Amino acid sequence: MFFIFSLIFSLIFLIFFVYPITVLLLVGSKGIISSLKNESFLAAVYVTLIISTTAAIFAVIFGLPLGYIIARYEFKFKSVIETIIDIPIVIPHVVVGIMIVLAFSSQYGLGPFLHRFGINVIDTILGATLAVSYLSSTYTIRIIESSIKMIDPEMELISRSLGASQMRTFFNVILPNIWKSVANGALLTWARATSEAGALFIVAYYVLFGKTTVYPSSVYIYESYVGLGLIDAVKFSAALLVIVISIFILFRLFLNLRR
């Protein structure tokens, strides 16, 4: 009986996830091809993929050492650091946008210093990447931490006893055993960054890209909805959904085939 109830509630929840996607694809299917031929939309998607991919790489580079320290060491204020890592999840995204603007604008924080070197954050790919990284890196860090905790510390001790340095042990023992978890964490960060809208409305409503300005895809769809109406927003949304879900599924299939 418990299994039947669990199955029913699971199916209801899965339908809740799948139903809106199905409706969007059915309604917007006729406009997907035309959307994929729209140069301004493709530019928006391209910029978004640059931002989200950079954020995922950023999360892996800085998340690996941080996740390792949290997983392997006990120290004072460790719980404080863990709380700091989780804080971005609970902050409203628009508030994160305001925070990034204050921290890096020309009037506050590091902004004046960066401006001396010609580094601008607001309305740039850099600013957009910082915003989405702030919001999405937690997933990668936590997955890395969990995967390292699952590795027997004895493996590291054996490696060290054979003369390997701690860094060599990390790259030869730890990393080969967690790389799939790291890749999955990066994928979640990428997906979360791709879907971001709220913070981008504040930090980078449009970005300077070459000699032109381009909306991130979420802002582009919002502009389509406000300026042209629901029908245009639906076709662009469906096209974006096809692109990101295809990338997501292909990456997951690649990881599964590597098992």
Image (cartoon, grey):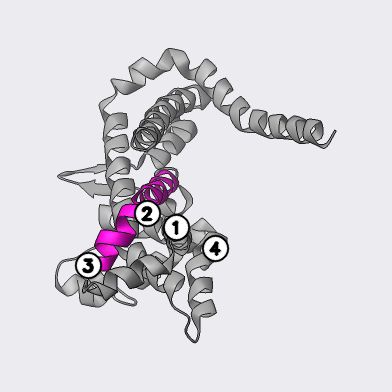
In the rendered image, the vertical position of residue 79 relative to residue 140, given as above or below? below
Element carrying mark 1: helix
Label 3 neighbourhood size at 10 Å, few (<14), some (14-19), many (20+)? few
Q: CA distance from mark 1 to mark 2?
A: 6 Å
Q: Say which mark, if any, is on residue 147.
A: 1
Range of residues picked out in magenta: 168-193
Which circle's residue, 3 or 4, is located before the other in the chain?
4
Residue extending farthest to the bottom is 76
Q: Which residue is mark 3?
A: 168
| Residue located 40% across and 66% down the image | 67
Element carrying mark 3: helix
Q: Say which mark, if any, is on residue 40.
A: none
Q: Which residue is mark 4?
A: 91
**Residue 146, horizontal then vertical, whole percent:** 48, 60
Of residues 85 and 109, the one nearer the viewer is: 85
Of residues 196 and 161, the one nearer the viewer is: 161
Task: Tell me the kind of residue under disc 3.
Answer: Arg
